[in-house]
Image: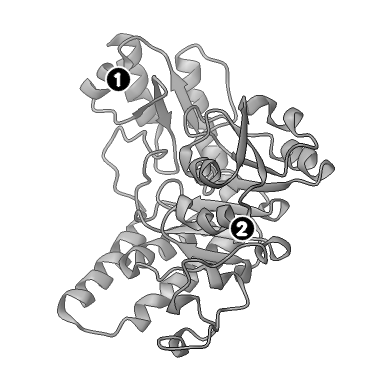
Amino acid sequence: MWDPEPGWLNTASYGLPPRRAFEELQAMLADWRVGRTSWEGWDIATQRSRESFARLIGVAAEDVCVGAQVSQVLAPVAAGLAGNRFLVPDVEFTSNLFPWLATAQVRTVPAASLADSVDSTVDVVAFSLVQSADGAVADYAAVVAAARAHGALVVVDATQACGWLPFDGSLADVVAAGAYKWLMSPRGSAFAYLAPHVRERFLPVAAGWYAGEDVHGSYYGEPLRLASSARRFDISPSWPVYSGTAPALEVVEEIGVAAINAHNVQLANRFRAGLGLPPGDSAIAVVDVPGAEELLRRAGVRAAVRAGRVRASFHIYTTDADVDLALNALTHG
């Protein structure tokens, strides 16, 4: 279902499209090139994507908005919670940090002590379910329990988790995710679950015609007539991007996140074992081998460097041969 060149260990930077997603995107582009059809047919993919994402994290589709990037879908959350007191991991990816720094009071602590640091001074806990820098998996249940015990809201960035790590999105108040990594979509599609009990606090400051209750009846003029669901936070979607997003998410559903998780973590642990490292629970592994970046590059292995260490990431299209190629490069030069 995929066509990767050997040595791709960088899904944490961007995922590779399933063949079906690539083909649907090409078909849309071919129609656009010659003006074969109107855009309404292309837009069906946006709703398919919304519904698929909702199923993947266990929430209702009417509680999901669509957008372009994580910081963009979090912007109305930041505006609505301006002045609140946030607790955030100290090495958090900035799409889930800068919006709060711009609008609120922020205290940072090590990710491992996040749950223990929640107290009566915290209004909102915001964190990545899987950390971008090192692949550490948050203790989601513990953080949620601590937040609820102190009446705090929970905002989760699931970009590095959604697609390989099973989790219940409904436990949080807000879950945002970019789809171009583990959901293997074109860059430019993102989603946010906005729980009904909190979204009344958020202002749809980017609302346009696509946020209307009746999209096709919202092209012109007053009055304000936004959707009653989370769609009021939608921005007008990029049709090519969502044409590739819908089939990619549906492939994840068909395979099953639990099956993908087992495959990914097994390969990551094969990689760790080959370097003498203990097993972990993540599809992302970081290594401190001297000269690792250059050793991997010479072997044709594509990985990333984050926070000064080589970051390798393993997904459904990764094979034992990919892992062995990387191990041979790191252990034998």
Q: Earlier in the sequence, mark 2 or mark 1?
A: 2
Give the camera-side residue of 260 and 55. 55
Give the camera-side residue of 256 and 89. 89
Mark 1: few/some/many CA within 10 Å (<14, 14-19, 20+): many
**Residue 293 marker:** 1
The percent coordinates of residue 56 (x first, y second) are: 59, 57
Q: Residue furthest left?
A: 34
> Horizontally, is 206 left or right of 81 in the view?
left
> Horizontally, is 330 left or right of 265 in the view?
left
Vertical side of 281 occupied by 330: above or below: above
Quadrant of the image occupied by residue 129: top right
Secondary structure under badge 1? helix
> Horizontally, is 56 left or right of 181 in the view?
right
Quadrant of the image occupied by residue 150: top right
Mark 2: few/some/many CA within 10 Å (<14, 14-19, 20+): some
Image quadrant where one finds the C terminus: top left
Residue found at x 33% / y 57%: 19
Q: Residue furthest front?
A: 83
**Residue 80 marker:** 2
Residue found at x 40% / y 38%: 318
> Horizontally, is 140 left or right of 94 in the view?
right
- Circle 2 or circle 1, nearest the eye: 2
Secondary structure under badge 2? helix
Residues at discs 2 and 1 in contact (Cβ within 8 Å): no
Give the camera-side residue of 107 and 17. 107
The percent coordinates of residue 243 (x first, y second) are: 36, 68
Residue found at x 70% / y 61%: 198
Disc 2 versus disc 1: distance between alpha carbons? 42 Å
Residue type at mark 1 is Glu
**Residue 171 marker:** none
Vertical side of 87 occupied by 45: above or below: below
Residue type at mark 2 is Gly
